[in-house]
């Protein structure tokens, strides 16, 4: 059979469509490209493997996995309530995760967490990426720009002003840390940028309420922690690439 130009064009178009169509993957899964780039899942969508409670170990807690989501159930009282911590420590990395929060919810993600029985809580050592429902937040949280979503909680306001999606809707966040320099993103917008190795950072801590905790903000390597606070929060698609 003679192959005409039109035949060739159809074949080429078909090959291009196949090659250019993005690979579709479900939640809590990695695409072929992500695997090749070095991404790994921190949450498999089925269990809390790779995580434990801060200073508590692997015990029954308010953190449960249901329908592919990692949920913190705030109104349960027969289990331990504590922040959930990665078993591993990380230093230079790109972390991505999706989260949705309950109405008037308030939570956070801590980085560079030091786990010691002499440190009472994860937040006493690791800076926080704030998670907040702006649409139902207490007025003082929105008036005080140091406590808005995706800021370096209680230390710096958002670099670029952005509101998260309302309670019950999914937000996408990213934390990049390399050489002690940290960047926070909320739904693609840069919200925090800070060098944790500078004197200016130490001075900011010294003038804040965190000054009572001598190890707060000192480390540039540590665990990643999810906060168990007074309201429910859910996570999925937690993935990391070491840089």
Image (cartoon, helix red, strand yellow):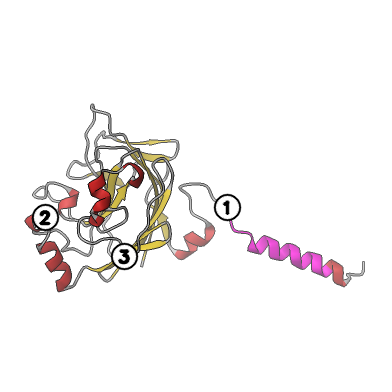
Residue appearing at x 31%, y 65% in the figure:
159
Mark 3 element type: loop
Q: Quadrant of residue 209?
A: bottom left
- Mark 3 residue crowding within 10 angstroms, few (<14) / some (14–19) / many (20+): some
Q: In this figure, which residue is indicated by the disc labeled 3?
A: 159
- Mark 1 residue crowding within 10 angstroms, few (<14) / some (14–19) / many (20+): few
Mark 2 element type: helix
Percent position of residue 32, x then y: 53, 58
Report if residue 225 is visible in the image: no
Tag of residue 51: none
**Does 3 lie within the magenta span?**
no
The answer to whether 96 is drawn above or below residue 177 in the figure is above
The answer to whether 177 is drawn above or below residue 76 in the figure is below
Q: Quadrant of residue 104?
A: top left
Residue appearing at x 23%, y 27% in the figure:
77
Percent position of residue 3, x then y: 88, 69
Q: In this figure, which residue is indicated by the disc labeled 1?
A: 24
Left or right for 3, reference 236: right
Residue appearing at x 19%, y 71% in the figure:
197
N-terminal-most mark, 1 or 3 = 1
N-terminal-most mark, 2 or 3 = 3
Q: In this figure, which residue is indicated by the disc labeled 2?
A: 209
| Residues drawn in magenta | 8-24
In this rendering, which labeled residue sits more in front, label 1 or label 3? 3
């Amino acid at each position: 059979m003679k192959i005409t130009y039109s035949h060739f064009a159809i074949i080429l178009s078909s090959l291009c469509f196949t090659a250019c169509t993005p690979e579709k993957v479900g939640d809590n899964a990695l695409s072929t490209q992500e695997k090749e780039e070095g991404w790994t899942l921190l949450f498999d969508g089925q269990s809390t493997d790779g995580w434990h409670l801060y200073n508590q170990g692997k015990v029954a807690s308010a953190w449960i996995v249901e329908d592919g989501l990692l949920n913190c159930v705030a109104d349960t009282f027969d289990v331990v309530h504590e922040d959930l911590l990665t078993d591993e420590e990380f230093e230079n990395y790109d972390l991505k995760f999706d989260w949705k929060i309950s109405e008037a919810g308030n939570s956070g993600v801590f980085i560079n967490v030091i786990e010691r029985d002499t440190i009472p809580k994860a937040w006493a050592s690791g800076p926080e990426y704030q998670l907040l429902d702006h649409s139902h937040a207490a007025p003082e949280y929105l008036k005080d720009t140091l406590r808005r979503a995706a800021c370096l909680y209680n230390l710096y306001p958002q670099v670029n002003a952005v509101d998260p999606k309302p309670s019950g809707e999914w937000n996408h966040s990213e934390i990049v840390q390399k050489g002690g320099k940290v960047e926070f993103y909320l739904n693609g917008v840069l919200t925090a940028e800070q060098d944790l190795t500078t004197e200016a950072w130490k001075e900011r801590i010294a003038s804040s309420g965190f000054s009572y905790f001598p190890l707060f903000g000192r480390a540039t390597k540590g665990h990643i922690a999810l906060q168990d606070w007074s309201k429910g929060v859910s996570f999925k698609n937690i993935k990391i690439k070491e840089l």
